[in-house]
Amino acid sequence: MRLVSRPVETVHAQSVAMSQALEREAFDIVETPECGADAAAVSALLRVPVAVRFHSPARLTMGTYQTPMLDRELTAAVERIAVNRARVRTACSEFVADQVADRMKAPRPIHVIPNGIHFELFDRDPLIDRFEGKTEEDQR
């Protein structure tokens, strides 16, 4: 139950905050990350147009973490609700946009809004990538 309670608390808090904001003013659209249930809650519970921003969707990233399969599948299913309901979809890079479209079958267009990182300044570091291309035995 611990895995479920934190996202539910977050969604509830976000729903309350957005409801209060909507009482004060109208929004043409609300941008929200795809992660967890946040975007689904905004689009479904509050009936406000949503722009979903792809950065690290559960379907593509949670397999790299030690999380239960059920948690990954449920999170990805809830994210899918938001992706399907979104009026606009954006990604932080062409790579993310292509991965989301190809591997998650997210509807296009997915507009790329760069995240502002200058990749030539922060390119690969050979010390960080020292194990790339080596077997697990080579890394010991």
Image (tube, grey):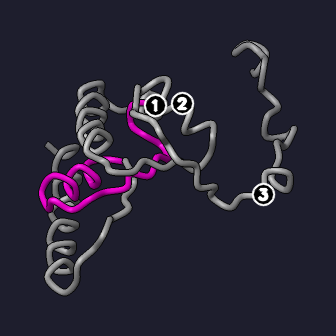
Q: Residue furthest bottom?
A: 24
Tell me which numbered mark, 3 or 2, is placed earlier along the sequence: 2
How far across and down, in percent of the image, does residue 41 sit? 19, 54
Q: Amino acid at mark 3?
A: His
Q: Residues in magenta?
A: 35-60
In the rendered structure, does residue 125 fall within the stretch colored magenta? no
> Which quadrant of the view contains residue 73?
top left
Q: Which residue occupies 46% across, 46% down?
A: 54
Cα–Cα span, label 1 and label 3: 24 Å
Q: Verify CB contact (< 8 Å) between mark 2 and mark 1.
A: yes
Question: How would you rate the neighbour count of disc 2 (Cα within 10 Å): few for under 14, some for 14-19, many for 20 or more?
Answer: some
The type of residue carrying mark 1 is Leu
Element on which disc 2 rests: helix
| 86 relative to 115 in the view: left or right | left
Q: Residue at x 75, y 21 (%)?
A: 140
Expressed as whole percent of the image width and height from the top left, the position of residue 78 reads 23, 39
Does the magenta portion include 48? Answer: yes
Could you tell me how far apart the alpha carbons at marks 3 and 2 are, in whole angstroms? 21 Å
